[in-house]
Image (cartoon, rainbow, N blue to C red):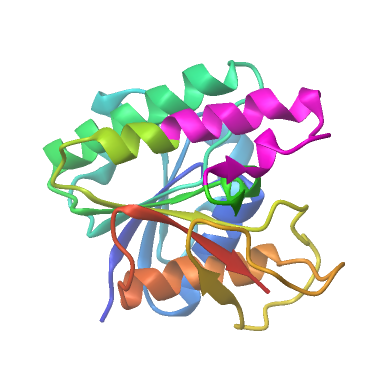
Amino acid sequence: MMSEIVVFGAGGRAGRRVIAEAVGRGHRVTAVVREPARHSGLAGDRVTLVRGDVTRADDVAEAAAGHDVAIGSVYRADVPSAEFYVAAAHALLEGLERAGVGRLLTVGVGTTLETAPGVPVHDTPGFPAEFRAFSLGHAAGLEVFRAAETPVDWLVVTPPPTLLDDEAPRTGGYRVGGNQVLPGDEGVLLSYADLAVALVDEIENPRHHRTQIAVAP
C-alpha cells in the first residue's frame, strides 16, 4: 500500500537513502530542506522538493499536510545541539498534530543508547568530551518525545555508536533491539542504505511505538 511520506532533513546522507528506499517501494515522498537550491537533484518522479525549517511548527504543519507519516533525519552544525534537537522535537510534535499526521520516525544517535541500565554511551569513562554535547542534545530531544502528551505515535530509530558506512550497498538485513547497544561483530558497520530499510520497514509494518530502538547490522 502506497504511503505519502514527508522527510525532514532530506538532503543528508540518511535522508537521501530513505527517499531512494521509499520511492523504490512505490511510496511518494515530500523532501523538506532549508535550502532547496542546494538540493535540486532530490526532486524527481514521486519526489517533491519543498522548503521548510524543522524547528518551526508552522513549517512542519505546512509541509506535512496530507501525508501519512513523517521521518526526521536532521542536523545543524551552526546551532547548539541541545537547542536544535529540543526545538525540532517540539516543532515536529506540534506541527504533525496540527497536520493530522499520526506517525513520526526520527533518526537517533548511537551514543544515547545504554551500555548498562541507566548508563548511556556518552556517560561511560573516556568518552570524548568534544562529542558529548552533541549526544546530550540528541538525548534532550528524546526526552521531549518521552514527556510529551501527544497523539503522534513517535519512534526514535538509532544506529550503533559508530560511523555508518556511506558506500556499502543495501543488503536489506539488520537487527533490532531496545534502548541498549546491540552486541555485534567488531568492525562491522551499519550502512546508511540498511538504516533506510529499517525506517521504511517500520512505516510499512509498524512494530514499535513511543520508544527508542537500536538497529545494527
Magenta span has 199?
Answer: no
Q: Using residue 200 as the reference point, say whether residue 117 is left or right of it.
A: right
Rendering coords of residue 153 (x, y %): 23, 53
Residue 29 in picture, x, y percent from top left = 38, 59
At x 19%, y 45%, the residue is: 65
Residue 6 horizontal/vertical position (percent): 35, 52
Residue at point 23% right, 35% down? Answer: 148
In front of the other: 40 or 165: 165
In magenta, the rendered stretch is 118-141
The spot of residue 11 in percent (x, y) is 58, 44
Q: Is residue 30 above or below residue 175?
A: above
In the image, taking residue 188 as reference, residue 96 lies left or right, namely left
Give above or below for 36 relative to 213.
Answer: above
Q: How many circles with numbers are drawn on the protein?
A: 0
Main secondary structure of the magenta stretch: helix
Q: Quadrant of the C terminus?
A: bottom right
Q: Does the magenta run of residues contain 128? A: yes
Q: Specify whether 157 is left or right of 116.
A: left
132 w.r.t. 12: above or below: above
Q: Quadrant of the N terminus?
A: bottom left
**Residue drawn at x 15%, y 37% as measured from the top left:** 149
Q: Is residue 148 visible?
A: yes
Q: Residue at x 54, y 27 (%)?
A: 137
